[in-house]
Image (tube, rainbow, N blue to C red):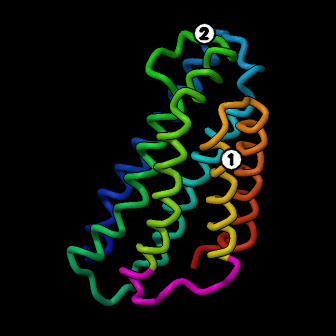
């Protein structure tokens, strides 16, 4: 077993827990037959988080040839999936016996914590890159799309208005799909 295979076990567990949290939450909402139409944009947030989990797992494969691992590089490696897991826990309330309007209001009530952690997640991707490769972030498409994702979150952090949340959720999903399509379609 290589070092990367050993280290990636915990990554796989955290990503699996996050995906299980999201998918089981959606399944419970659908199973209970709730009217989710007023919370369509919360489903966009969930879809973005699902894609983010898959993207992180996909990208981490590229780290398999990293020549040297230290405790600190491994800790930096685990920050992003850990923050992403916390976001998955926040996006759906514990009580899933909600209709779409209540689900939207529950998300809005936690929006500052959610988007604050999302901001930390974006900054931690740059920190992770620096810790693992020793390279400072470049002004390239990868960094630009991550910054755009952060900028989309600012109005959603500040405003409790549903329209602002819906626009931010849809824009975030579009940026995530662009990010994956432009940079990570093929495994490196």
Q: Which of the two residues, 67 or 46, is positioned nearer the viewer here?
A: 46
Which of the 4 image quadrants contains residue 17?
top left
Which circle's residue, 2 or 1, is located before the other in the chain? 2
Q: Could you tell me residue 68's position as x and y percent?
A: 28, 87
Q: Is residue 152 above or below residue 122?
A: above
Q: In the picture provided, is 153 more to the left or to the right than 41?
A: left
- Residue at x-position 62% and y-position 15%: 102
Whether residue 53 is in magenta: the answer is: no
Q: Could you tell me residue 55's position as x and y percent?
A: 57, 60
- Quadrant (top left/top right/bottom left/bottom right) for the N terminus: bottom left
Give the class, few, some or many, for how many residues have Cα within 10 Å of label 1's Cα (few <14, many ≥20).
Answer: some
- Residue at x-position 41% and y-position 73%: 128
Q: Which residues are magenta?
A: 130-141
Check disc 1 and report its element: helix, strand or loop: helix
Q: In the picture provided, is 104 more to the left or to the right than 72?
A: right
Q: Which of the two residues, 182 or 187, is positioned nearer the viewer here?
A: 182
**Residue highlighted by disc 1:** 155
Furthest toward the front, the residue is: 158
- Residue at x-position 36% and y-position 80%: 131
Which of the 4 image quadrants contains residue 138?
bottom right
Q: Could you tell me residue 149's position as x and y percent?
A: 66, 59
**Residue highlighted by disc 2:** 32
Q: Is residue 114 above or below residue 172?
A: above
Give the class, few, some or many, for how many residues have Cα within 10 Å of label 2's Cα (few <14, many ≥20).
Answer: few
Q: Is residue 156 above or below residue 76?
A: above
- Quadrant (top left/top right/bottom left/bottom right) for the C terminus: bottom right
Check disc 2 and report its element: helix, strand or loop: loop
Q: Could you tell me residue 120's position as x and y percent?
A: 46, 58
How many numbered dots are placed on residues in this image? 2
């Amino acid at each position: 077993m290589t070092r990367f295979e050993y280290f990636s076990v915990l990554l796989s567990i955290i990503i699996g827990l996050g995906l299980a949290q999201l998918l089981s939450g959606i399944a419970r909402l659908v199973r209970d037959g709730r009217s989710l139409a007023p919370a369509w944009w919360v489903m966009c947030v969930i879809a973005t988080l699902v894609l983010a989990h898959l993207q992180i797992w996909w990208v981490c494969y590229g780290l398999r040839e990293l020549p040297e691992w230290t405790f600190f590089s491994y800790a930096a490696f685990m920050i992003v999936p850990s923050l992403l897991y916390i976001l998955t826990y926040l996006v759906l309330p514990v009580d899933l016996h909600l209709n779409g309007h209540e689900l939207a209001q529950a998300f809005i009530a936690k929006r500052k914590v959610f988007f604050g952690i999302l901001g930390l997640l974006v900054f931690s991707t740059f920190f992770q890159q620096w810790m693992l490769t020793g390279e400072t972030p470049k002004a390239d498409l990868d960094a630009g799309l991550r910054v755009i994702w952060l900028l989309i979150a600012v109005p959603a952090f500040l405003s409790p208005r549903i329209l602002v949340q819906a626009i931010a959720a849809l824009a975030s999903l579009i940026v995530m799909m662009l990010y994956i399509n432009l940079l990570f379609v093929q495994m490196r």
